[in-house]
Image (cartoon, helix red, strand yellow):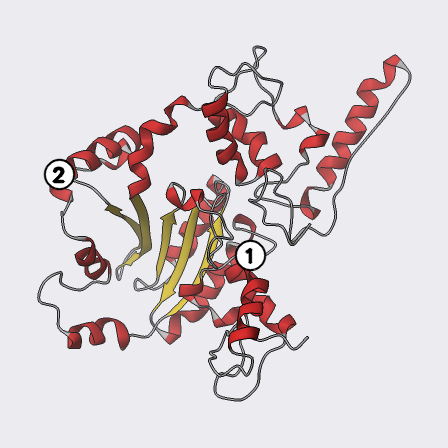
Amino acid sequence: MSEISESEIPYPHREGKSFFISYEVDWIKEGDSTKNIEWMRSLYKYMAPYVSKNPRGAYINYRDLDLGQNRIDGSASYEEAKVWGVKYFNGNFDRLVKVKSKVDPSNFFNNEQTIPTRPTMGAFSSACQLILTIMANASNTTTTSTGQASFQALFLGGTTELLEIMQENFSELGLKREDCIEMSWIQSVLFFAGLPTTNVSLNAFEANILLSNFKGASDYVKQPISKTGLQGIWRNIVQMSSTSILQLQAYGGRMSEISDTSIPFPHRAGNTYKILYLVNNDNNIEELRRLYKYMTPYVSKSPRAAYLNARDLDLGHNEMWTNYTPSYEEAKIWGSKYFKNNFDRLVKVKSRIDPDNFFRNEQSIPPSFT
């Protein structure tokens, strides 16, 4: 079960699951239905702290209409159906919606929890070329402590097309033409690195990037964070240094269409956005760790996933400058967070190409000695 990718077929409940629970109740007397059903619901509610979250997974062959159901004609909006759809299918729900929309657009085949059609999915195809990021940090003065959020976006297209997409889908942001800068893709790399987009010297690159120090951590979010959770995040941000940044980068689009086993990077369908925690001062590392700990209930689990390019040695590490090679069990602690099921495949490659572990760092993929 664990060796098969969760995106291989619609059934997603694979690695990270220790066991499956089914709640069943049977009765003979007609008048006992309410009593027995309520008993099962009570037990299901009691188990909430001990089972999967974001979403609380469910098994499609034990269809549970308490999770929600379609209208009497078998129809449901995408948003309505996603409430139960992600519990059964996780990140595969969106892929099933695409198949349903293509094969059965009129929803001829339906039941109480049908996969819905989504006729408007193609209308937003240009947004697959859009990456939207929120940057949040403290904005403190000698008399007040508050926070601020700014929005940055990269769009592979022209300003006119972007304005149409933003007006249709994110009108609250009030994007105007004067807010947009058209440039080449390579110039955008410099722009997001905080460098000038013309006449860049190697010395400037080294001063801004190569010689800067920072501490980073990362998370992935699969389900919307509650209002209470967001308020707690904001309270933490206000208490942080103004140079500490929380970055939220939207996922979806083309990211979700690529299999999580296609390349080592596995964080694809089912992830709503990525979080980066960044501080650039040794004195601020503890405030980053405090916010990271606070986020535990709201982010991915089993494993709590992480982004390799924001390498976080708090997840575990080996001694880079010694001949020590971590065991498979040690390295899997961080390796499964970065690579999920692809970690074992990377160990096989490492064992074949570099069995002596000549190429290594603090969180190397280890060779296998079995």
Up-down relation of residue 258 to residue 277 (above or below): above
Which residue is pictured at 34% across the width and 64% down the height?
Answer: 241
Up-down relation of residue 229 to residue 321 (above or below): above
Relative side of 143 to 183, left or right: right
Q: Quadrant of the C terminus?
A: bottom right
Q: Earlier in the sequence, mark 1 or mark 2?
A: 2
Quadrant of the image occupied by residue 39: top right
Label 2 Cα neighbours within 10 Å, binned few <14 / some 14-19 / many ≥20: few
Which residue is pictured at 61% across the width and 23% down the height?
Answer: 113
Q: Where does residue 271 sit, x and y in percent of width and height?
A: 47, 46
Tag 1–tag 2 contact (CB < 8 Å)? no
Q: Residue furthest left?
A: 199
* Circle 1 SS class: loop
Q: Nearer the viewer, residue 181 or 339?
A: 339
Which residue is pictured at 59% across the width and 49% down the height?
Answer: 5
Q: Amino acid at mark 2?
A: Arg
Quadrant of the image occupied by residue 199: bottom left
Quadrant of the image occupied by residue 247: bottom left
Relative side of 243 to 226, left or right: left
> Which residue was labeled with disc 1?
304
Label 1 Cα neighbours within 10 Å, binned few <14 / some 14-19 / many ≥20: some
Which residue is pictured at 34% across the width and 63% down the height?
Answer: 244
> Which residue was labeled with disc 2?
177
Q: How many marks?
A: 2
Q: Where does residue 235 sit, x and y in percent of width and height?
A: 42, 52
Alpha carbon of mark 1 to alpha carbon of mark 2: how far?
A: 39 Å
* Circle 2 SS class: helix
Up-down relation of residue 332 to residue 226 (above or below): below
Q: Nearer the viewer, residue 262 or 15?
A: 262
Q: Residue furthest top?
A: 73
Q: Nearer the viewer, residue 116 or 4?
A: 4
Q: Amino acid at mark 1?
A: Arg
